[in-house]
Each structure stands twice: as C-alpha cells, then as structure tokens.
Image (spheres, rainbow, N blue to C red):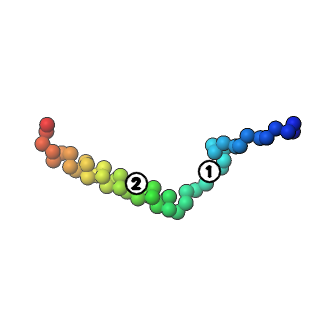
Amino acid sequence: MNGRNEPPSSALAQPLRPPSLGRAALYAGLFVLGAVLGVAGALLQPAWFPG
C-alpha cells in the first residue's frame, strides 16, 4: 500500500441481485403486454387488404 486510493469497483464486478418485487412485476406485465400485442398483430395482419 503506497497511499493510493483504490478505484471504485465496477458495477459489472458486483454479484447479481434479484430485482425488487415492483420491478419484477413491471417486467412480467410488459412481457404479457408484448405477448398480447403479438397475438393481436398475428390475427389482424391477415385481415388487412393487400396494398
């Protein structure tokens, strides 16, 4: 130790933590919303008139 300050550790070097309950619920809600929109788009696209 020669008196230098250690640089702050990177966020990438930290252990992973599970997301908070609110963030996990947000991710789940966005996943469900994406799935619903994907199914709706798959059902609507054939109904469009070409061109």
- Which quadrant of the view contains residue 8? top right
| Towards the viewer: 13 or 36 | 13
| Local crowd size for mark 2, using a 10 Å CA cut-off: few (<14), some (14–19), many (≥20) | few
Residue displayed at 40% across by 55% down: 30
| Mark 1 surroundings within 10 Å by alpha-carbon count, few (fewer than 14), some (14 through 19), many (20 or more) | few
Q: Mark 1 = which residue?
A: 16
The secondary structure type at the circle numbered 2 is helix
Q: Given the current orientation, which residue lies at the most extreme bottom position? A: 21
Of residues 43 and 6, which is closer to you in this image? 6
Q: Is the C-beta separation of discs 1 and 2 under 8 Å?
A: no
Q: CA distance from mark 1 to mark 2?
A: 21 Å
Image-based side of 8 in relation to 20, left or right = right
- Quarter of the image that includes the C terminus: top left
Q: Is residue 21 above or below residue 13?
A: below
Q: Which mark is residue 4?
A: none
Give the residue type that dot 2 points to. Answer: Phe
Q: Is residue 14 left or right of residue 42?
A: right
Mark 1: which secondary structure? loop
Q: Earlier in the sequence, mark 1 or mark 2?
A: 1
Image coordinates for residue 44, horizontal then vertical, percent: 20, 49
Q: At which x and y percent is residue 6?
A: 77, 41
Task: Give the left or right position of residue 18, taking residue 44 as reference.
Answer: right
Identified at 40% across, 54% down, the residue is 31
State the image coordinates of residue 15 (x, y, percent, origin top left). 65, 49
State how many labels appear: 2
Tell me which amino acid carries mark 1.
Leu
Q: Which residue is mark 2?
A: 31
Residue 1 versus residue 21 in the image, above or below: above
